[in-house]
Image (tube, helix red, strand yellow):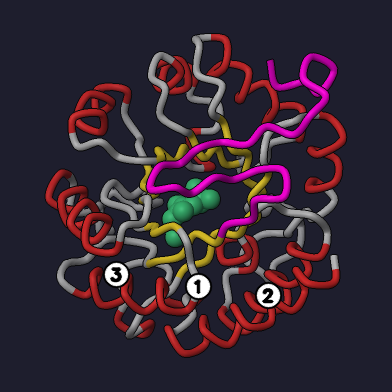
Amino acid sequence: RANRKFHPEDSVIDCGHGVKIGGDQFQVIAGPCSVEGENLIRIARRVKAAGATMLRGGAYKPRTSPYAYQGMGPAGLDLLCEASAELDMPIVTEIMDPRDVQVFLDKKIDVMQIGARNAQNFPLLKEVGKTKTPILLKRGMSGTVDELLMAAEYIMSEGNDNVILCERGIRTFETRTRNTFDLNAVPVLHHLSHLPVVADPSHATGYTRYVEPMALAATACGANGLEIEVHDDPSHAWSDGAQALTPDQFDDTMHRIRAIREVV
Ligand code: PEP
Ligand code: MN
């Protein structure tokens, strides 16, 4: 169960490659929005050198338009696995279809991400719940905290307790940012649940210039980790270039994140 009543201590989740998240174990997940090809390994080397402990990248992309880039599919998973092996870091990648669970298991994907658009896709939640693979579960675009916790419950009720919650911004009347970053959710989720909480300032803000300040704020308010999009050529990124940090910007941000971690 996700409720702290049943589990007073913070859960610590083993993501593989010796990386644990939760409690006082803080991790930064970084990488491109989409796996695009050979630039993945270059970006991965840079984010690792800057201090990221987990690599992200989407091989299956939930795009608003069916004509937009949909992701590389299994070939993208293979590129992630090669980068993971070279750099000895766990990978986080989105799964959109319950029929793909076996492929993700066969390729030994370390962490499966459930995206905001699938936050209440109950058949998908139940199917990943039948595995033991850690799940990074994002809050729905217009999902409440309780709906996020109930989505976690769908996964856990099938037997998978390895759920990491993710605040990635919610849709409000505000249009100056892509979403409204609900940092209240971080302490609220810690109060209600023992599960680790990650914050995603990239999707929450939608613009590179706001990613660092909100990454620092999320760190300060007690997130157990951050998910940050990084691209080596943001203006040519196949998705979400407007919110990507360059590797140099990410390196600067990591220094400031570590400074905040020292004081909280
Ligand atoms: C992503 O992580 O690239 C993504 C699509 O995020 P979200 O589901 O939060 O929109
Ligand atoms: Mn993205």
The residue wearing badge 1 is 51
| Quadrant of residue 253 within the rendered picture | bottom right
The quarter of the picture where the N terminus appears is top right
Mark 3 vs ligand 2: CB under 8 Å? no
Horizontal side of 113 relative to 40 (left or right) equals right
Residue at the extreme top: 158
Tell whether label 1 touches label 2 (CB within 8 Å).
yes
For the image shown, how many numbered marks are present on the structure? Answer: 3
Mark 1 residue type: Gly
Structural crowding at the residue carrying mark 3, measured as other residues with C-alpha within 10 Å and reported as few (<14), some (14–19) or many (≥20):
some
Q: Give the range drawn in magenta.
A: 1-27
Compute the Cα span from label 3 to label 2.
30 Å
- Name the residue at 50% across, 11% down: 159
Q: Earlier in the sequence, mark 1 or mark 3?
A: 1
| Quadrant of residue 197 within the rendered picture | top right
Main structural element of the magenta stretch: helix, strand or loop? loop
Number of the front mark, 3 or 2: 2
Q: Earlier in the sequence, mark 3 or mark 2?
A: 3
User: Where is residue 146 shown, x and y percent of the image?
Assistant: 76, 27
The residue wearing badge 2 is 258
**Vertical position of residue 190 compared to residue 234: above or below:** above
Point out which mark residue 238 bears.
3
In-front residue for pair 19/203: 19
Compute the Cα span from label 2 to label 1.
9 Å
Q: In which quarter of the image is ligand 2?
A: bottom left
